[in-house]
Structure formats: structure tokens, C-alpha cells
Image: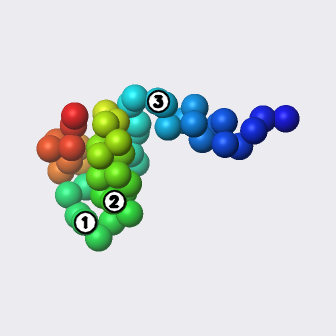
Amino acid sequence: MTDPAQVVREVMDLRTWAVVGLRQNPARPAYGVAQFLQRQGKRLAPVHRAPQDVIEWRH
């Protein structure tokens, strides 16, 4: 059986993360998730139907 703590460690070791629904709106959950990931040194790949809204997030 897989150790849940090991799975979390492996996932957090990933360098690039896709953030679905990311926009420049601090009230949206994706915004907070993206901020957290950037503080962890992760590279973001915003996934949104209007990508020009999130161009600043590309790292």
C-alpha cells in the first residue's frame, strides 16, 4: 500500500503545476492556490478559457 505522506512529498516535488480557473481575482480559490505555489517556487501553467486575464502569472 502507498504511504499517503510519501505521495504528498512526491507531488510537492513537482516543479510545474497547472492551475485551473486562474484569474486576477483574489476572491477566487485558484488565486490563493497559485500564490501559495509560487511562494513554494513552483512554475504555473494557468488553465483558463481567457488566458490573457492571467498572463502575469506565467513564471
Q: Mark 1 points at which residue?
A: 26
* Residue 27 spot, x, y in % from top left: 29, 70
Q: Residue furthest right?
A: 1
Query: In the rendered image, which quarter contains the C terminus?
Result: top left
Name which of mark 2 and mark 1 comes first in the sequence. Answer: 1
Secondary element at tag 2 = helix
- Residue displayed at 67% across by 42% down: 5
Q: How crowded is mark 1: few (under 14 residues within 10 Å), some or many (20 or more)?
A: few
Secondary element at tag 1 = loop
Pick the residue in front: 46 or 9. Answer: 9
> Label 1 near label 2: C-beta < 8 Å?
yes
Q: Mark 2 points at which residue?
A: 32
Q: Which amino acid does label 1 sit on?
A: Pro
Q: How many marks?
A: 3
Q: How crowded is mark 3: few (under 14 residues within 10 Å), some or many (20 or more)?
A: few
> Label 3 near label 1: C-beta < 8 Å?
no
Q: Which amino acid does label 3 sit on?
A: Leu
Q: Mark 3 points at which residue?
A: 14
* Residue 56 spot, x, y in % from top left: 14, 44
- Residue displayed at 34% across by 36% down: 42
Q: What residue type is labelled 2?
A: Gly
Give me the C-alpha separation between circle 3 and circle 2: 18 Å
* Residue 15 spot, x, y in % from top left: 40, 29
Name which of mark 3 and mark 2 comes first in the sequence. Answer: 3
- Residue displayed at 66% across by 36% down: 6
Between marks 1 and 3 in the image, the one whose residue lies nearer the viewer: 3
